[in-house]
Image (cartoon, grey):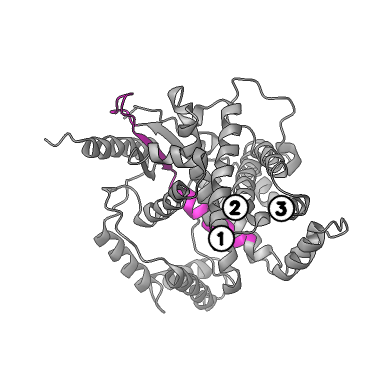
Amino acid sequence: MDDSPAVLNARALRRQQLAAYQYAKLTPPDLSAAALAARDVASSQALEPGGSIEQAITEGLRAQGRDPEAAKSEVERLRKAAQQIDQHATPLVDSGEDQPLCHPHHAMILATQRQRLEGLVNYGLPEFASAFSWLSNKVTLSTLQTGELNARTFKAPYAQDSQPQYWILFDPVFFDFFYQLSNAFASAIDMDGLDEFGNRYAMGDQTAGVDKAIHWGDAAPVEMVFKMLRAFVAFGFAPPDIVPYDERIFALAETLRNQVALFVLAHEYAHIIRGDMDKHASHLAPWQAEINADIFGFRMSNAVLTMEGAPAKVRKVGINLFFCGLMLVELTRRALDIGEKQRVADLLPRQAPSATDSHPAALSRLCFLDDEFSQHFPPDQVRGSAFLTNLFMEITTQFWLRIEPEFLDLHSQGVRAKSVWNGSIGLEQGKT
């Protein structure tokens, strides 16, 4: 039997992943190349005129007493969305790792973000260069069902303290969620207004409001966010359908979701670099360790974006989206479980955190990072970044004002947040 570190690592990770699927009462997917290709073919056939999807929609419309001809336009909408995904999909590159329970696209996204972070070794910053040199070949990136829009870092249970190995594991829904949320936010942003009023605000014009950089002429982004949150929080699944978007927003949406993945991965690396993993798994870190990992993770992601030539004011937009997404999930949980109106401001804690508290509220974490940004950049860049933070907060607020009544209605019908969305699913390090 091959008991090399690589084989032990793959075997232990697979046990953990299978245990997570079992706990969540889900069947582990077949993510082999043959199975994925077969599903792609089946999906294409289902979307053809007269295919199984059109038939199912037609039957549903008839049952509701509606015009079955409307099925054709609905299928065309789905077909357009599928074509957009295919058009912009990055060709898969074999990572060379045995990852039977990690979707190849997810593995590629994570590998890309790792390469961006490892580029800091050659950037000339000692604190990053030494850290990533030490971590070379010691970190496995993959996915794990956790019920959280986040990642977790574990010490591999088979590894010895003298030769540690780490796992950074993202819930698979993380990628679907922020794909759709980035499309929704990008669709709500008026780029012309952002350029004009964002620049005016950066130059000191306090009358330049973020409302001039938002357009609500299309109800599609609001509907997208509602369906996405309902699917994830109420039912624990990915959105039931895909939604086409204006091609003009693709570049912004892609930037947002890539920055989200970069920051979250940098945050998890920060837990390892700072020594947090010597005391506990990352998701059990006390609140101060979480804030410190946020700050160090931001410094790493900021350094990457600086290296890549991104303007200072936009280096935190992915972080804004990440925490706004967590806020929307928390608001949805509360609406379904409590059934009372909530506002974004209600997410701020009413008392200071204690030393034993873990994972501060998303809004608190975003405020800490705004303060961190303000300490390291000149005033015009701070104001430019603040305009973007305010813009994302206003979009979050407006999304929630429009969809909250729907979730309060679901509460009145007895719908509650899926149990896994009330916290983690409970898989701890070494439990296989």
> Residues at badges 2 and 1 in contact (C-beta under 8 Å)?
yes
Say which of marks 1 and 3 sits in front: 3
**Quadrant location of residue 331?**
top right
Mark 1: give few (<14), some (14-19) or many (20+) Cα within 10 Å. some
Q: Is residue 409 above or below residue 38?
A: above
Q: Which numbered dot is residue 318? A: 2
Residue toward you, 307 or 208? 307
Q: Is residue 88 above or below residue 375?
A: below
Whether residue 164 is in magenta: the answer is yes
Residue toward you, 196 or 137? 137
For badge 2, the amino acid type reads Gly
For the C terminus, give its image quadrant.
top left
Residue located beneath label 3 in the image:
385
Which circle's residue, 1 or 3, is located before the other in the chain?
1
Mark 3: give few (<14), some (14-19) or many (20+) Cα within 10 Å. many
Secondary structure state at the residue bearing disc 3 = helix
Between the C-alphas of marks 2 and 1, the distance is 8 Å
Which circle's residue, 2 or 1, is located before the other in the chain?
1
Instruction: Find residue 374 and report its horizontal and vertical position in percent.
Output: 73, 44
Q: Is residue 414 above or below residue 80?
A: above
Residue shown at 31%/24% (left/top)?
162
Between the C-alphas of marks 1 and 3, the distance is 16 Å
Residue located beneath label 1 in the image:
255
For badge 1, the amino acid type reads Thr
For badge 3, the amino acid type reads Ser
Which circle's residue, 3 or 2, is located before the other in the chain?
2
> Residues at badges 3 and 2 in contact (C-beta under 8 Å)?
no
Left or right: residue 257 versus residue 86 is right
Q: Is residue 238 at all visible to an observer of this figure?
A: no
User: Magenta stretch?
Assistant: 156-185
Instruction: Find residue 330 and report its horizontal and vertical position in percent.
Output: 62, 41
